[in-house]
């Protein structure tokens, strides 16, 4: 048995599609009524339901402030002085890491403990040098005491020599007969007294030279002590909040700090690293038990209450922009350039050099970031305010629709939305100056203007009432 197939002409199919599509072209009448040809100049009447659906909002045109601006793109970076890399200045082994990536730390918080044999050896040598210096100072003190004794002995010897010489002279020059033996004895006594005085003077001179030599040796040891102490301080620079080093038991080495930071059982070369700022740990480079070398980064701490934004100003705008340094800057997300500014800042630096490849000059903007909206690496739009003009007829930038070289807005008279061509003047990222086409008091669509261009008005709309 043969089945017959139903054949539908293609013309009927096309007609059915067109009939079905007609209600979709009606702007709000649920398909009822005749649709006019698509003409932007035709006034539009929109029901409250449709207005709510497309988010229509109107506002009165008024006088306001307009700004001449330059728009740039940029990327957020932390301020250089707000980023600190905690690095070791000695070789050693990581004992413990007290902070993880993402941890909020305060200035002075313990971050890392490190054990350094190199530092231990340096501290040992320092202590040995201090012991030798102490022994030398003891010797110097004894030598100075001996000098004092020699000075007294010399004074007595000189006095004895003077008395002996006077006695010899008296006996020699006396009128009476003096035995030769007596005269000889007096002469010998005078000679012995002079000799003892001279020997004492020589010993005193040698003692003084010896003390001077020991003083020079002590001064040299002091310089060596200071140099070694500086080496230890440099190696044990823990970036503490107070700038002081915390070396276990270092007080016993007489480095000028108390030993209260030492703990029993700790290695002499234990170094503690503290956070130099309050911020967040953004990088951790080591784990417990890891060996580290000189200059190796252990952790990085950053603080983002103030950030820098690196922007690029095209060469074509450099001359027209003038001196940008100190100018106010509004910062917006690239993903939503028409949104409100998420931060404000100031142009801090404009490079005098043009990049030979990109043909741009580098601009640095400094911005406050109290809410943390400006994240490291975020791409942003920058609006630099060059000058301001007061009392201009302005409308929000969102009210203006562009069609090629033409610009227009929709004016609302309480019933109909009518397209109105306008002449634009200065525009910034928020408002547009209207030189012709609007007057203060006109109500214009500031949200949903583009949606109005997509609505088809009904035929036969009469705006004259």
Image: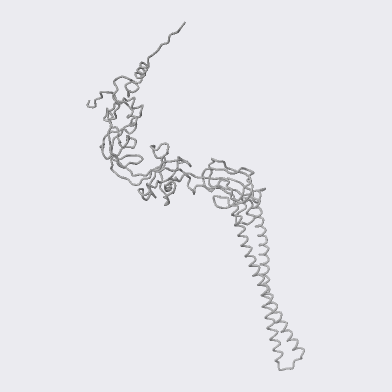
**In the depicted structure, whether residue 448 falls above or below residue 251:** above
Specify the farthest residue to the front: 2
Residue drawn at (64%, 63%) of the image: 221
- The residue closer to the viewer here, 105 or 415, is 415
Q: Is residue 219 left or right of residue 50?
A: right
Residue 4 x, y percent position in the rendering = 43, 8
**Quarter location, residue 74:** top left
Judge from the rendering whether residue 282 lies leftward or rightward of residue 208; answer left or right: left
Q: Where residue 2 sits: x, y (%)?
A: 46, 7
Describe the colour scheme in one phrase: one colour
Please determine whether, in this image, residue 76 is positioned above or below residue 353: above
From the viewer's side, name the closer residue of 170 and 204: 204
Examine the rendering and report whether any part of residue 306 can be seen. Answer: no
Residue 50: in sight, yes or no? yes
Q: Residue furthest right?
A: 181
Q: Quadrant of the C terminus?
A: top left
Label count reads 0
Asked if residue 130 lies left or right of residue 58, the reply is right
Residue under the point 35% across and 48% down:
320
Tell me residue 429's x, y (percent).
36, 40
Q: Residue furthest left?
A: 464
Residue 264: x %, y % from top left: 66, 48
């Amino acid at each position: 048995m043969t089945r017959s197939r139903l054949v539908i002409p293609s013309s009927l199919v096309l007609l059915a599609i067109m009939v079905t599509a007609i209600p979709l072209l009606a702007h709000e009448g649920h398909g009822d009524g005749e649709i006019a040809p698509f003409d932007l100049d035709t006034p539009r009447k929109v029901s409250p339901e449709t207005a709510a659906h497309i988010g229509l909002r109107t506002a009165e045109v008024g006088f306001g402030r307009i700004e001449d601006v330059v728009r740039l793109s940029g990327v957020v970076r932390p301020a250089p002085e707000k980023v600190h890399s905690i690095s070791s200045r000695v070789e050693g082994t990581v004992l413990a890491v007290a902070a993880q990536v993402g941890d909020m730390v305060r200035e002075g918080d313990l971050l890392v403990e490190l054990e350094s044999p190199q530092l231990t050896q340096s501290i040992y040598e320092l202590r040995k040098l201090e012991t030798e210096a102490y022994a030398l100072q003891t010797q110097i003190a004894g030598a100075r005491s001996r000098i004092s004794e020699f000075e007294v002995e010399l004074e007595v010897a000189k006095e004895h020599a003077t008395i002996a010489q006077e006695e010899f002279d008296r006996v020699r020059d006396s009128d009476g007969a003096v035995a030769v033996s007596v005269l000889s004895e007096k002469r010998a006594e005078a000679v012995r007294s002079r000799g003892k005085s001279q020997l004492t003077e020589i010993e005193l001179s040698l003692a003084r030279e010896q003390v001077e030599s020991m003083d020079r040796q002590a001064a040299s040891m002091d310089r060596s002590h200071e140099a070694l102490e500086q080496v230890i301080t440099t190696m044990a620079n823990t970036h503490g909040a107070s700038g002081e080093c915390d070396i276990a038991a270092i007080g016993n080495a007489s480095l000028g700090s108390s030993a209260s930071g030492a703990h029993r059982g700790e290695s002499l070369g234990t170094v503690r690293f503290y956070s130099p700022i309050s911020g967040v740990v953004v990088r951790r480079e080591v784990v417990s038990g890891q060996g580290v070398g000189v200059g190796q980064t252990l952790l990085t701490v950053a603080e983002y209450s103030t950030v820098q934004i690196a922007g690029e100003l095209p060469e074509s705008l450099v001359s027209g922009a003038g001196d940008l340094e100190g100018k106010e800057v509004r910062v917006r997300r690239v993903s939503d350039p028409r949104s409100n500014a998420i931060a404000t800042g100031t142009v801090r630096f404009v490079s005098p050099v043009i990049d030979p490849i990109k043909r741009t000059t580098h601009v640095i903007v400094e911005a406050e970031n109290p809410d943390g909206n400006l994240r490291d690496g975020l791409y942003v739009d920058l609006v630099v305010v060059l000058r301001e003009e007061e009392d201009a007829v302005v409308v929000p930038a969102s009210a203006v629709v562009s069609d090629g070289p033409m610009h227009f807005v929709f004016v609302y008279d309480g019933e109909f939305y009518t397209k109105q061509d306008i002449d634009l003047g200065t525009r910034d990222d928020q408002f547009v100056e209207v030189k012709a086409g609007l007057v203060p008091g006109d109500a214009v669509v500031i949200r949903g203007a583009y949606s109005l261009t997509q609505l088809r008005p009904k035929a036969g709309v009469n705006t004259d009432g």
